[in-house]
Amino acid sequence: MLCQRNNDVINVVNRSAAISDNNDNLISIDGIIIDITHMKKMERQLRMRNKQLELMGSELRKANQRLMEIDQRKSELVNIVAHDLRNPLNSIRMFIELLLKYENSPLENEEFLHKIEQESLRLINLIDNFLDIEKIETGRMRYRHQSVELADLIEHFVSIYHWEAEKKGITLTKDSLVPIPEVIGDKNRISQVLSNLLANAVRYTNEGGSINIRVRTVAGTRMSERFQPPSPEKPHKHVKISIKDTGPGINREFHKHIFEKFYQLSSPAIKNNTGTGLGLAIVKEIVEHHRGRVWVESEEGKGATFFFTLPIKNV
Ligand SMILES: Nc1ncnc2c1ncn2[C@@H]1O[C@H](COP(=O)(O)OP(=O)(O)OP(=O)(O)O)[C@@H](O)[C@H]1O
Ligand SMILES: [Mg+2]
């Protein structure tokens, strides 16, 4: 190693040769020392550039892979949308044909009109769900947070689904163990959560069953906090809403999966499911955006209880 006067290390190579006479006596050593500091520096820079290029290459490959996956998901979604839209549209077309082409009794006509109304609502629900999932996947879901009177919202949906449930001979009841607090959130999105969970409960509960909504407050969402009574030092920070039904229930192994998009259980207890399998995926996204949690407690054949929490305003 050689150093310059300013203590900088310089790299050198030494080329030398021993010169001997005919009797192999060493006469001299001829040598040359070449300063290769600059070359070495260039070599290091080259190695660094190479590494940077490799890194950029791998980033590019990953970005490309992500784009391909998004593209694939988009194609899948388009296929599903096209397929799922066809069914209600076909039914609507068929009932319109029945109305136009045949002499029906007034009662039959009324029935066909009801079917058309039902199928149109199904179409609207499908399109809304697809649009929401697209927004979630592309990170374009927008929220407008405001103070929400949760008590009024729950009352509103209980009255809507009370009527829906009654048509199936299901009783829908509500009890609140506390005065229902206000929450901060997007009123329309929280409505979507309540509506999806209640629609599921009504859809999957058999005739003559029952559904119960219950509202409680909890210290927090961790297991240890769920049963703590409120105190001045530790006021309850979350409201917990549960929707319990007496439907077919859900086997434990599917509890996580049902919150994934397009996941639907194929059980003999659930026949002719006309849903999209997107409702719970949307519910999960909305609740988690509000810093809440959603989960299910259920055993197959023993009904299901869906829970979700939302942070209470001003605590
Ligand atoms: N209360 C319930 N009881 C039993 N199974 C349920 C219940 N709620 C949901 N499930 C199961 O979870 C699946 C996913 O529910 P999700 O709400 O995401 O989709 P969906 O109801 O099939 O369609 P939609 O997109 O119209 O809501 C359902 O298909 C059903 O198999
Ligand atoms: Mg649903």
Image: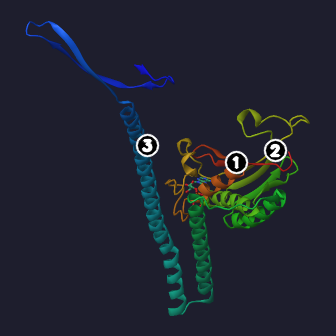
Q: Quadrant of ligand 2?
A: bottom right
| Mark-to-mark CA distance, 1 and 3 | 49 Å
Q: Residue 210 appears in which quarter of the rendering?
A: bottom right
Q: Nearer the viewer, residue 76 or 13?
A: 13
| Mark-to-mark CA distance, 1 and 2 | 12 Å
Q: Which residue is mark 1?
A: 307
Q: Which residue is mark 2?
A: 217
**Could you tell me which residue is drawn at 52 percent across and 60 percent down?**
271
| Mark-to-mark CA distance, 2 and 3 | 54 Å
Query: What is the crowding at mark 1: few (fewer than 14 residues within 10 Å), some, or many (at least 20)?
Result: some
Q: Is residue 307 left or right of residue 237?
A: left
Q: Residue 26 appears in which quarter of the rendering?
A: top left
Q: Could you say where residue 153 lies in the image, as x and y percent from the top left?
A: 80, 61
The CB of the residue at mark 3 lies under 8 Å from ligand 1: no
Circle 1/circle 2 CB separation < 8 Å: no
Q: Nearer the viewer, mark 1 or mark 3?
A: 3
Given the image, on which type of amino acid does mark 2 rest? Thr
The CB of the residue at mark 2 lies under 8 Å from ligand 1: no
Q: Against 150, is 16 above or below?
A: above
Whichever of labels 1 and 3 marks the residue nearer the N terminus, that label is 3
**Could you tell me which residue is drawn at 53 percent across and 80 percent down?**
92
**Which label sits on residue 52?**
3
How was this image coloured?
rainbow
Given the image, on which type of amino acid does mark 3 rest? Gln
Given the image, on which type of amino acid does mark 1 rest? Phe
Q: Nearer the viewer, residue 114 or 87?
A: 87
Q: Could you say where residue 82 lies in the image, as x and y percent from the top left?
A: 47, 71
Q: Nearer the viewer, mark 2 or mark 3?
A: 3
Q: Against 119, is 205 above or below?
A: above
